[in-house]
Amino acid sequence: MCLAIPGKIVEISSENQDSALVEVIGVRRRIDLGLLQDDKPAAGDWVLVHVGFAMSKISEQDAADQMNTLRMLREIDGAMQEVQGYGLEDREIDASRLDYKEPIQ
């Protein structure tokens, strides 16, 4: 299944404006922003990520809804495997954050 995973942009690279650090459930990874040239995201924005590329900007509520949908479909494990498969920084997943009832902070 192709997964689009919501992530919050932590920082935009100062060396390459098409590269950003994004956080997904406590895991931080580098992603490519090149597909969002017409609507560049900034730190703090939410994006849908697929195979290391930001596909679109979304709201925080849409991000929470997407994570809940993935959880209900039992696709959280697949989503997290995808996130762990791209990027540079490794961090442990905080499993307590996998069940969203409120917008992601």
Image (tube, rainbow, N blue to C red):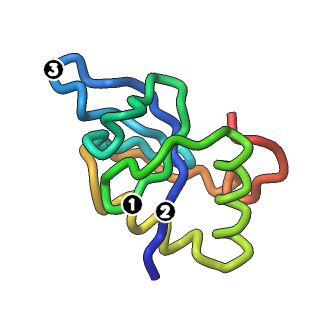
State how far apart marks 1 and 3 are (Cα).
23 Å
Mark 1, secondary structure of its residue: strand
Image coordinates for residue 102, horizontal then vertical, percent = 82, 44
Q: Is residue 32 above or below residue 53?
A: above
The residue carrying mark 3 is 15
Mark 3, secondary structure of its residue: loop
Q: Is residue 17 above or below residue 72?
A: above
Image coordinates for residue 100, horizontal then vertical, percent = 76, 53
How dense is the environment of label 1, judged by Cα within 10 Å: few (below 14), some, or many (20 and up)? Answer: some
Left or right of residue 26: residue 60: right
Q: Indicate the quadrant where residue 36 lies.
A: top left
Residue in the picture at 52% in, 37% down:
8
Image coordinates for residue 29, horizontal then vertical, percent = 35, 44
The residue carrying mark 1 is 50
Amino acid marked by disc 2: Ala
Mark 2, secondary structure of its residue: loop
Image coordinates for residue 22, horizontal then vertical, percent = 42, 38
- Mark 1 near mark 2, Cβ–Cβ under 8 Å? yes
Amino acid marked by disc 3: Glu
Residue in the picture at 70% in, 68% down:
69
